[in-house]
Image (cartoon, helix red, strand yellow):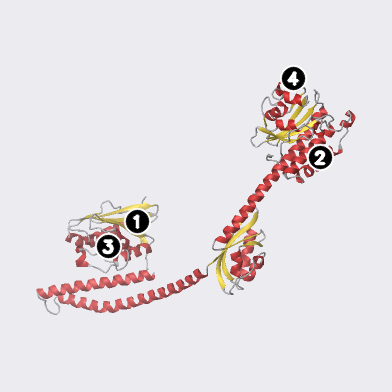
Amino acid sequence: MASDRYGHSPAPASSGPLASEASSPAPHAWSLAERERPIPELADAVDGPMAVRSFTAEYMSPLAVRESLDMLVRLIERVAPGMRGSVLLMDADGLTLRHGAAPHLPPAYCKAIDGAQIGPQAGSCGTAAYRRERVIVTDIATDFLWEPYRALAAQYGLAACWSTPILDGDGTVLGTFAMYYDAPRSPADVDIALTESATHLAKKIINGARAAESLRAKSEALRVSERHFREMAEAIPVQVWTAQPDGQLDFVTKQTAEFFGRSVEEMLGSGWREAVHPDDVERVGERWRQSLERGEPYEIEFRLRSRDGEYHWHLVRANPLRGDDGRIVQWFGCNTDIEQQKKLAAALDVALADAREANKAKAAFLAMMSHELRTPLNAIGGYAQLMLDDIPTPASPAQRNYLTRVVKSQQHLLGLIEAVLTHAKAEAGKIVYRITDVRAGEVLDVLESLTAPQRSAKRLEYDCARCDGALTFRADKEKLLQILLNIISNAAKFTPADGRILVTTSIQSPGVGAFTVSDTGVGMTAEQVATVFEPFVQFDSSLARESKGIGLGMPISRELARGMDGDLVVTSEPGVGSTFTLSLPLASASPP
């Protein structure tokens, strides 16, 4: 036989006449004086602490709930002679009433009304549940509320029925408590008080059953959740653990215990401390105490002894888990073995130190070599210039042509040596910057004169009309000139004859300004743009063969820009041209 959500089965159908004990009135027939005398059992159940203990705490199983309701009805029947009580329970749909308890009503009648729908004309119980108020029917034979059930009631000799809804604190209907009589009858005040007490106790029993059911469901969900947590914790490749609010470990995964070569039980509590490196114990303990006292996340690196006796560096993290009241209920932590990362980091530190020393040695070597190379080159240039000045004797036209080429080559070599030396200084971080306020107009005037010969040779249009000469940058003026001169020289070098070079200034963002140089040159592919700032990278072009460098101009320019808290970037399109943008901090007095 099917049971409802409280574990109650509908009453079985009666197979015989209604003369059985189950269909007879309550066995006690007390006088009015006896009814008005306090009943010890009821007084204890209604007013004393027995209410919760007797009807809820000790009876939480479905069978116990049914027995509790049955006991309640029998207790009320003792107080009201000739009355037969009934408790119906509201189904989960909020529309259907199910049999709860009726120890002295005919089983066949109980079965017949089991599953009855509530409504405005549904007998005493169905109507009381529908209205959420007490319904008193003094004569079933004449009351219109009983029209659907009048014949059924007459069949079993039921003449009057008073029903009170069992309401939860929020007004939800939990069920009904009904008092049946074999003759038409109106309730007295004591009867009304009795139904109030009965519904109060029935509510406690039903709510207790619901709470127990909810607790069982939550407990089962918690067990499932804990099992899933343990399964996931064992699957992830780190050591997982949890601790109580006081910091004592209450769970570690099996793989965690296996790493230390100990049992799970040995790791719990404070057993894990034995695996900490002696030099780290005090530091680790102090940091853990701080996290426990302040409720802050725990993160630290220290060494733990593995099962082979070797100490491994670990990154240990833990976060507090808090309850609804904000208090810490547990700590969730994990240990990550970072021994290999530590070894790699140490090796990297050594490699970086070696690289720094190599850079220093390279810079020193280049400085020495530049000095050694400059001395003879300066002598060559000096003597060639003397001969061009007709000292000691005038030179012939052919000789002057050769001497001019010697001087030009000497200057080119000096430029290459200076570029290599500057690049080495930039890599070693040894370039000195003298940052001052530099007006754009000062720089642009110098650039125009310095690049004029190169531009004139190819009839290049030079446009800087859109520049704001008052825009003031924070920069090293010499380094700024060097960067822009390099950019414009490259633009002239890679732009065909009769091309165009455009220079503009702008404010990119608050406190940041920019110089932009655009040309109509050959442009660069995406691959070339990606490597244009790499040292010693050169691009083949018939336009630049006569003055080909060694590929350090752009790398040095970007290093200088970044050394002044700026940057140098480029966009380009083959056959269209290139645009270089140099961004630098603006002086506070610069116009908006």
Q: Is 306 above or below relative to 481?
A: below
Q: Nearer the viewer, mark 3 or mark 1?
A: 3
Q: Nearer the viewer, mark 2 or mark 1?
A: 2
Q: Residues within 10 Å of mark 3 (few under 14, many from 20)?
A: many
Q: Quadrant of residue 256?
A: bottom right
The reply to whether callout 3 and callout 1 are in contact (CB within 8 Å) is no
Q: Nearer the viewer, mark 2 or mark 3?
A: 2
Nearest the eye: 586 or 554: 554
Q: Which residue is mark 4?
A: 142
Residue at disc 4, secondary structure: loop
Marks 2/3: CA–CA distance: 101 Å
Three-letter amino acid code of the residue under disc 3: Leu
Dot 3 or dot 1: first in sequence order is: 1
Q: Is 364 above or below relative to 126?
A: below
Residue projecting furthest to the top: 142
Residue 97 in the image: state x and y as whole percent.
Answer: 69, 33
Q: Nearer the viewer, mark 1 or mark 4?
A: 4
Q: Residues within 10 Å of mark 4 (few under 14, many from 20)?
A: few
Q: Which residue is mark 1?
A: 472
In the figure, is residue 350 to the left or right of 439? Answer: right
Residue at disc 1, secondary structure: strand
- Residue 485 got which mark? 3
Marks 1/4: CA–CA distance: 104 Å
- Residue 45 got which mark? 2
Dot 2 or dot 4: first in sequence order is: 2
Residue 87 in the image: state x and y as whole percent.
Answer: 74, 34
Residue 460 in the image: state x and y as whole percent.
Answer: 19, 57
